[in-house]
Image: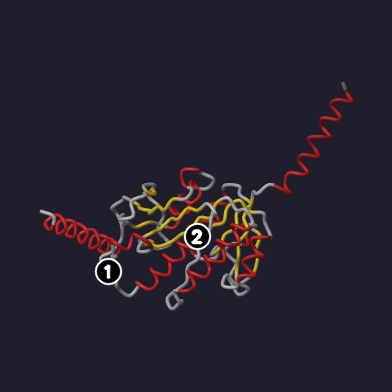
Amino acid sequence: MRSFLSSLKLGLLLLTLAAPASAQNGVLVFGGTGQLGREIVSALVEAGEDVTVFVRPTSDRSALDPLGVTFVTGDVLTQADVNAALKSGPYKVVIDALARDGGVKPGFYIDSMKYIAAAAKETGVKQVILHGSVGAGLSHLSDRDPGGEFSDLMLAKGLGERYLMESGVPYTIIRNWALLPARLKETGAAFLTEDQSARGLITRDALARLTLECMDQAHCLNEIFHAVDDATDFPEPFKSRLKAQRDWEAQNQKDREAQNR
């Protein structure tokens, strides 16, 4: 009996030692040093996930250092760097929270996702979660300013989404219409909807929560969501901007109904 128990313990030990070599347990985050990315990384760490953050050599990592995450360094617009980052895993989930300040060329969103999606597919990633913008893809059809100053950017983001969707890797796209200031925290009323005409305001910590709620969830795979917070107590000028959008939508709907009579 003692010999049997010893053999059983040895077998369990060998299985435990072998598991990490094949298991895909890590999460790789692009854009983790940004305001949205930091919220997502913090939520992942709090949830006990093994987190790696892809950073540029010049990125400020000070806000993430206390969290004890792993860093991989490179340029997201260099395919070899992205490939190396994905191969440093294995990773079960890749999260793209990349965002650039004004002045970035729209092609950034096309090329970065082209490289991320291809490398994720090659390395067997189970899910890529892309944080995008309302106005990309089919959602531009309900935009009151489809040809405005952000039209080239939205077109590029839509093409980036298309690279992800056609890559063959399971994906989840979460679009937001407008982010509230970082100092504001979520109301608890934020949710994801498949309605691509939905417009709403949302906080970064709410997006982080919704991101984690979609990780490893079959109902989120190969879906596009819009993130919306139905609370009404928002600061100006965000409240006025949202009201103007919804007033336009209501009038547009009336005009369409009148034309169909």
Q: Which circle marks residue 36 in the picture? A: none
* Quadrant, the N terminus: top right
As drawn, 82 above or below 89: below
Q: Is residue 219 left or right of residue 257?
A: right
Q: Nearer the viewer, residue 220 or 191?
A: 220
- Figure disc tally: 2
Q: What percent of the width, then of the height, locates residue 209?
A: 47, 50
Q: Residue furthest top?
A: 1
* SS assignment at label 2: helix
Q: Nearer the viewer, mark 1 or mark 2?
A: 2
Residue at coordinates 67% horizontally, 60% vertically from top-left? 87
Q: Which circle marks residue 164 in the picture? A: 2
Residue at coordinates 59% horizontally, 57% vertically from top-left? 121
Q: Is residue 17 left or right of residue 121?
A: right
Q: Amino acid at mark 1?
A: Asp
Residue at coordinates 59% horizontally, 58% vertically from top-left? 120
Q: What percent of the width, then of the height, locates residue 252?
A: 19, 60
Quarter-wise, where is residue 122 in the image? Answer: bottom right
Disc 1 target residue: 145
Task: Tell me if mark 1 has few (under 14), some (14-19) or many (20+) residues whose alpha carbon lies within 10 angstroms of its own.
Answer: few
Quarter-wise, where is residue 106 in the image? Answer: bottom left
Cα separation, mark 1 vs mark 2, equals: 26 Å
Q: Residue furthest bottom?
A: 103
Q: Nearer the viewer, residue 210 or 63?
A: 210
* SS assignment at label 1: loop
Residue at coordinates 15% horizontally, 56% vertically from top-left? 254
Q: Nearer the viewer, residue 85 or 185?
A: 85
As drawn, 7 above or below 84: above
Q: Nearer the viewer, residue 65 or 107?
A: 107
Q: Amino acid at mark 2?
A: Leu
Q: Is residue 68 left or right of residue 154?
A: right
Task: Tell me if mark 2 has few (under 14), some (14-19) or many (20+) residues whose alpha carbon lies within 10 angstroms of its own.
Answer: many
